[in-house]
Image: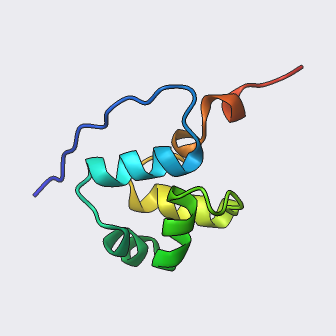
Amino acid sequence: MINLFVFQPYNSDMNIGEILKRRRTSMGLTQNELAAKAKIAQSQISQIENGVSDNATIDMLRKLAKALNCAVIDLLPDEDKLKTR
């Protein structure tokens, strides 16, 4: 069985927590389910989504991206994707 979901686009003002929550809910996952899939604590997901912590490590973002079937860059706000020269 293929798990298909429709990800709603987000506006460029969104932070990592808002993007994470939108992706998670688009897939129909609870924080506990995502935590189990990503092998990280549910409290860490809650802190990121609620803006309590914006200190997500690259390792944590990799685990979340894998669990959400996306690339790490898809979890980042547009301002963090821009290259400067």
**30 relative to 14 in the view: left or right:** left
In which image quadrant can residue 14 be found? top right
Locate residue 7 relative to residue 79 in the image: left or right. Answer: left
Q: Quadrant of the N terminus?
A: bottom left
Q: Residue at x 57, y 47 (%)?
A: 16
Compared with 36, 60 (above or below) is above
Residue 84 position in % (x across, y down)? 84, 22
From the viewer's perspective, tell me whether residue 83 is left or right of residue 7: right
How many tags in the picture? Answer: 0
- Asked whether the viewer can see residue 40, the reply is no
Report whether residue 14 is seen: yes
- Residue that appears at 59% across and 56% down: 51
Horizontal and vertical percent for residue 7?
31, 37
Horizontal and vertical percent position of residue 28: 22, 56
| Quadrant of the rendering where the C terminus is positioned | top right
Residue depicted at x 48% and y 44%: 19
- The outermost residue toward the left is 1
The way the protein has been coloured in the rendering is: rainbow
Residue 63 position in % (x across, y down):
52, 65
- Taking depth in this image into account, of 30 and 61 the one nearest to the observer is 30
8 up-or-down from 64: above or below: above
Q: Residue at x 38, y 78 (%)?
A: 36
Farthest residue in the top direction? Answer: 85
